[in-house]
Image (tube, rainbow, N blue to C red):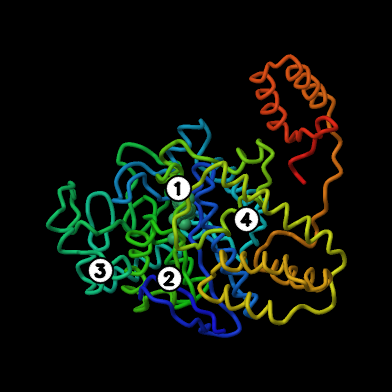
Amino acid sequence: MALQLYDTYTRSLRDFTPLHPPEVGLYACGPTVYDYAHIGNLRTYIFEDILRRVLEFNGYTVRHVVNITDVGHLTSDADTGEDKMEKGARRTGKTAWQIAGEYTQAFMNDLRHLNILEPTIWSKATDHISEQIAMILCIEEQGYTYLTSDGVYFDTSKLSDYGHLGRLDIDGLRAGSRVDMGEKRNPTDFALWKFSPQDARRQMEWESPWGIGFPGWHIECSAMSTKYLGSFFDIHCGGEDHITVHHTNEIAQTEACLGTHLANFWMHGYFLQIDEGKMSKSSGEFLRLQVLLDRHIDPLAYRFFCLGAHYRSKLNFTWESLNGAEVALNKLRSAAYEWGTPADTVDAEYVARFTAEINDDLNMPRALALIWELVRSDLTPAIKKATLLQFDRVLGLGLADWQPAVVNIPDEVMALVQQRQQARSEKRWQDADAIRVEVGARGFEIEDTAQGPLVRSKMR
Ligand code: AMP
Ligand code: ZN
């Protein structure tokens, strides 16, 4: 039951063994804090949380580093456009520093709501400017950089295996490059340091050996991961969009300076889609976790929804499937609650089968199927409970602490229920349906029984 993980670098499943057991170094690219995280971003952090929990389940201790990108991420991945932070500052009328602080806090709150374990180390790009400058100097000394009028660039043609992670067709890109490359020598070259504009002061800028400016987006991850995890560590992850540009460039930087590919495994979570299309922060329309909270949907239902798909497949979001996940989660919670006190022992066969599923590249959909099998099995309730709680170390659903809520139904909800009864008795079905929706928005559901309407909280 060796742990096998899919490594994007080799495009294969590989047996995982830590470089320095029992510790595992894990680096996950964090948020760009110019806006709230959307639930797509959060899917990636749920995947990384499951990965960490699976590593811990296997007896390893995980040193988990997550960065906060609070400078340097431009609106275009081609190093043009505006810094997302300065743009966010203009949009909100606050300073770039203020919005970085506020959105970082909001992000951490989201993670707490989703039972995502706090990383061992949070590292902010703006706290590591000197490390980034040192790394650019190192790359420069090795002869991989050139200067343009707007910054210091990485010459990707000097690395023979540049683009391997993304399987980039470098010749095709060169031939097909119609974009204005400006002073860039190759379409894939990228900025390591950008100069502040001549005529304006940026909110975030620093002195450097090349002039006042700010770091490019990719250098922070190479510099900070090396600082906290060493020049070659176990696992580097992020969303699938990072494969072709951001992680490709992180590898190039570290290879130029230190001669390693930075990480032994490269792992990527696939996107959450909405209406089969991409959900992105820059599209302006995106769903925050707060929207779910406002609708009285338990955030852990979203976690459960994500567990239902393998991290290497795209997942389409619909309210209907989220509701379905919430119903299933509540069923599991109620079952576990009714099983009472857990036994001192677990069922070894179920644990072995569960371990086999999660160790097969984090196959959570199959692990969930096994859990329903456990629910239906004829094991004693106490053994079932102990076994499920063991699994919950990976699932992270807080099943040990869950209790059915004792909910008082507010007067206003009871008044609505009466209005609905009135409408029903007058055969005003549309009005009755509208009132049911209204009651639902307040977190309650109505079941029409032979004895009249039964009102219940949806947060059971
Ligand atoms: P950002 O804050 O844009 O730098 O993104 C934070 C993380 O979310 C990165 O690992 C991205 O790859 C990931 N991400 C962005 N959009 C999505 C999406 N729709 N579904 C899943 N992950 C995403
Ligand atoms: Zn990164």
Q: Earlier in the sequence, mark 1 or mark 2?
A: 2
Q: Is mark 2 within 8 Å of ligand 2?
A: no
Amino acid type, mark 2: Trp
In depth, the one of 1 and 83 nearer the eye is: 1
Amino acid type, mark 3: Tyr
Q: Is mark 4 within 8 Å of ligand 1?
A: no
- Residue matched to label 2: 266
Q: Is mark 1 within 8 Å of ligand 1?
A: yes
Quarter of the rendering occupied by the N terminus: bottom right
Of tags 4 and 2, which is closer to the observer?
4
Callout 3: 10 Å neighbours few (<14), some, many (20+)? many
Residue 60 occupies which quadrant of the picture? bottom right
> Position of 141 compared to 435: left or right?
left
Q: Position of residue 52 (x, y in %)?
A: 59, 69
The residue that appears at 17% across and 46% down in the rendered structure is 180
- Residue matched to label 1: 273
In the image, is residue 209 above or below residue 405? below
Q: Earlier in the sequence, mark 3 or mark 2?
A: 3
Task: Label 4: state its secondary structure.
Answer: helix
Amino acid type, mark 4: Phe
**Residue 144, labelled with which disc?**
3
- Residue matched to label 4: 304
